[in-house]
Image (tube, rainbow, N blue to C red):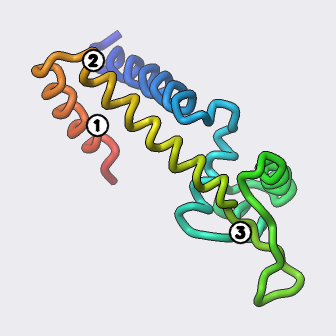
Amino acid sequence: MTENEQTALALRSIAARLARRLRVEAGHADYTSAQLAVIKRLLDDGPATTSELARDEDMRPQSMSAIVVSLEKAGVVERRPDPNDGRAVRVSMTANGTRAVHEGRAAKQEWLLRMLSERLSTAEQHTMAEAVGLLERLLAP
């Protein structure tokens, strides 16, 4: 295996482990990736119909409906009639859901800051900052 292949394998593994750990720190470990995608979409773009959410996530409306129902039961989202179309229902974040997401984001940031300062030397912290820049370049379009 080449060095680049080993690095790619390690990066993939570390990224997955970091994502799992951050979900735990945020208190979102029980959410699926599809549920988290819906939450992010609603926070970023505001209320949407189930059909719009399904189209955005490239899934069937029936599958999205099940996701919305599960989030509604958890108190994260709510459904209300569309004020412009009496036949349509719009899904939006609840105040509790929004607050939980913001608290989760803060918890993830606090955990990362604590780990950087507790586990890495000052020189390693600088190296990590440089590595973040390199990762940004990998992800650039």
Mark 2 or 1: the one toward you:
2
Residue on which the image places disc 1: 135
Front in this rendered view, residue 136 or 98: 98
**What residue lies at 76% left-to-right and 72% top-to-bottom?**
90
Horizontal side of residue 70 vs 47, given as left or right:
right
Q: Is residue 2 above or below residue 111?
A: above
| Identity, as a three-letter code, of the amino acid under mark 1 | Leu
Mark 2 surroundings: few (<14), some (14-19) or many (≥20) residues within 10 A? few
Give the SS element for disc 1.
Answer: helix
Question: Mark 3 sits on what residue?
Answer: 52
What residue type is disc 2 on?
A: Glu
Kindly report the distance in space between the C-alpha atoms of the residues bearing marks 2 and 1.
Answer: 22 Å
Identify the secondary structure beneath mark 3. Answer: helix
Q: How far across and down, in percent of the image, does residue 111 sit?
A: 40, 29
* The quadrant where residue 4 appears: top left
The quadrant in which the N terminus is found is top left
Residue at image mark 2: 118
